[in-house]
Image: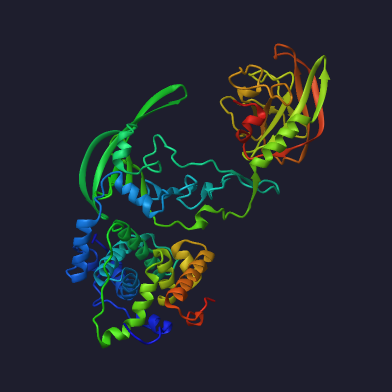
Amino acid sequence: MPHCEPQVRADHERLVQDHYASVYRFLRNLTRRAVDAEDLAQQTFLRAIGAWSRYDDRLPIRSWLYAIAFREFCKWRRNRLWLPLPTDRPAVGDAYEQFADAESLLNALGGLSQNIRATFLLHYVEELSIVDIAVLLDIPEGTVKSRLHQARHRLKNLLQEDESYVPETV
Amino acid sequence: MSQKPFDFQNALSQLKTVSPSRVPAAIDVAKPARRFPYRTSAIGLAAALAAAIFWPRAESGIAWAQVLDTNKGTQRIHVINYWRDGHKTLEWWRDGERYTYLSYAPGSMGKSLFMETRCDGEHVIHVNHDRKPRNGWRRLGKKEKAVPAEGFEWGGALVGSTSNIVDDIIQRKVYKLLDERTVDTAEGPRVRFRLSRASRFTIQKKTKTVTTSALVFVDPKTRLIQTIQYVDGKDNPLSKAVIEYPNQIEDSVFKLNTTDVDILDVDKDRKVVAQIIRRGLGSQTVKGQTVTLRSVLFDGAGALWILWSGNLPHGSLPHLVRIEGYPSPKVVPNVSFPMSTKAVLNAYSYKSFTANATERRSKVLPSINARLGGMAVGMRYQVLSQIDLVVPVLDATGKKKLGEAKFRNVPVHRIFSLFDYREQLGMQ
């Protein structure tokens, strides 16, 4: 780590402590592998710390970190374009039953593009607003809504559930 | 697999509970571990072995074909160019027949657009953001039918042509290969090629040769170009291009979202301009010399083009048109664009529109059986939709003025650029 003033180091520390868990969760749900999520989360914070002096208030810090995380994920994914991506498998038994619904959801989303998956996760899991997602992904709000609609449509088809299971975006 | 019905809310709740085994200290983040891409799990190892044995080798040509295949036969690329201070200068996308180019204003630190071009495969829209709206007239952009771009080789461009595999680009011999080595980067191992190119350019009649190099960083597996760092003769960084090959590009990237601009349909407008020229805007005869005013076109850069047939102006423009109610124009040396000083408007012309033009530069228009001539005046002032013009009428040598032809209430037609009407104006 480059030489830092104590105050700056404290800021970096707080950045990691406050936001690592949510960035890791986002990446874990995107990559579906803990080890890859850890690597990418590290890379995300490395970049964020490096770009700390250029951070402005255009985005909340959490959204800014998600934007960096998604870019790191895209780069990582591109480098593995030709290789099948194994996923962590939960152990069979009671613990698995607890996560069966999540597994089904991620499987259903797996057939969608990474942009749509990311938009879905940012909205429904990370609970960001459509406006925040539009800013952090640098796309129009209409595109955010379109992606969410595509995700819901896919879920409806693949899970063969009534659309009322999937709440409409306000 | 659970036999219970799928519960969406429960699924979301489960995903929200995902958490890391530990939160590292910031100092640990600074040194990311280099991990083997696949942990030793039965599934992971099997997948890695399968990939090594059965997946095609990413040799040149095959890798690009795989990219095309993944992208369903279209070339899909996204490039961002940065100046050496790290700010964006250019960003562009290509997806088969669709493309978008956004260039940023110098000095705006990548925050203000200078020009944008967006093609959705059917039409191309072009807007110049530096052309500020004037006097109640909104900025003018243009739209025209797209010309197929697939297979177009960009000559000196390193990416965006029919292949982005470095070996194919080196074979084109536009650039000279100086060296090649494997390097470690933040994105992983890369093969770095040093390519050089000598460019000649002339400034004020002095020809200079400048040699620049491009450090091209290539993915060792796919041989696709990932990053290009342009440097000068002393390896000082000049600019950088970062290249992505996305699986998908949003449709909205190829649609115009600038709102305060009028878009001119150039394909339709060409017919309008041809009709105006054919009908003419009036004729006058002065001492046996007839001048027929053919069109008055106000372009997006602020130049007012006054064009007529019969008695064309001399190339050195010894006598200029006047626009009544405005200062007299003057020819400003070495200026051939619509700049004007505070006191005067600058006048200029292209050789196509002067008596000195050869057949190589301009041609006779069949609709009027004559060549077009005329000149432009760079306007700073409000341009009305009608103006009063005074056109100089010259003798056979083109240097002596015989008199003036006055035209009143001449309608002004807005265009984006004169060069959109080459055929209609007889410009070669």
Q: Residue at x 40, y 86 (%)?
A: B5
Residue B37 visible to an observer of this rendering: no
Q: Residue at x 31, y 75 (%)?
A: A21
Q: Quadrant of residue B315?
A: top right
Which quadrant, please, contains the N terminus of chain A?
Answer: bottom left
Which quadrant, please, contains the C terminus of chain A?
Answer: bottom right
Q: Is residue A113 above or below residue B408?
A: below
Q: Is residue B348 above or below residue B112?
A: above
Q: Of B173 and B406, which appears nearest the observer?
A: B173
Q: Residue at x 39, y 48 (%)?
A: B82
Question: Where is residue A78 shown, x and y percent of the image?
Answer: 32, 57
Question: Where is residue B296 shown, x and y percent of the image?
Answer: 72, 33
Q: Quadrant of residue A108?
A: bottom left
Q: Is residue B272 above or below residue B108?
A: above
Q: Is residue B179 left or right of residue A53?
A: left
Furthest toward the left, the residue is B40
Residue A111 visible to an observer of this rendering: yes
Q: Residue at x 39, y 55 (%)?
A: B246
Tally of marks: 0
Question: Where is residue B257 shown, x and y percent of the image?
Answer: 57, 55
Q: How is the image coloured?
A: rainbow
Q: Quadrant of residue B172?
A: top left
Question: Where is residue B378 shown, x and y percent of the image?
Answer: 65, 33
Q: Is residue B122 left or right of residue B37?
A: right
Q: Of A169 and B112, which appears nearest the observer?
A: A169
